[in-house]
Amino acid sequence: MSFTFKARIYKVGINPCVKVPLSITGKMQAARGYIPVTGTMEDHFFRQTLVPVKDDNYRLFVNGPMLKATSKKVGDAAKFTIEQDKAIKALRIPEPLRAKLNEHRLLAAFKKLTPYRQKEIIRYLSNLKTVGALNRNIGKVINQLIRIE
């Protein structure tokens, strides 16, 4: 089900964003507090995540490509159409990382990380070119997870 709303773009720190009406987010299902969505801003397609804000509406961050494609800027109102992104994004943990996580009994700790953090770690490790670099960086991930636990 898609929802349309109009919102004024404002900044939080250096990040442009809009508030998403509670009447919309109340009909969506959050995963760990976040709501993955697809949609359009003035007919420009995007895939984003609605971020929860304590005691306030969910926030949709408006990135540079969205602003550029729509010629909008902070202070302008824009029309948004969003719907919950139900696409399942399966993450494949590289086998060397999985083996080390199992060895140190940290697989559950890794899965407790936010999906974005997991994805970034996997993406980074997958792009390393040498086995030595891969092993060094897996060691760093393991050390960080040990500190968290």
Image: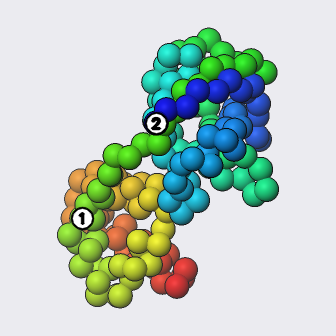
Pick whichever of labels 2 and 1 is earlier in the sequence.
2
- Residue furthest to the top in view is 71
Q: Position of residue 45 (x, y in %)?
A: 45, 24
Q: Amino acid at mark 2?
A: Met
Residue pointed to by mark 2: 1
Among the 4 quarters of the image, the one containing residue 121? bottom left
Q: Amino acid at mark 1?
A: Pro
Left or right: where 80 falls relative to 74: left
Q: Which mark is residue 94?
A: 1
Q: Position of residue 35 (x, y in %)?
A: 53, 49
Residue 18 in view, yes or no: yes
Q: Is residue 111 above or below residue 28?
A: below
Residue 74 in view, yes or no: no
Q: Position of residue 142 (x, y in %)?
A: 41, 77
Query: Which residue does the image show at 56% across and 16% down from the upper left?
Result: 42
Q: Is residue 107 above or below residue 128?
A: below
Among the 4 quarters of the image, the one containing residue 64? top right
Nearer-the-camera pick, 121 or 6: 6
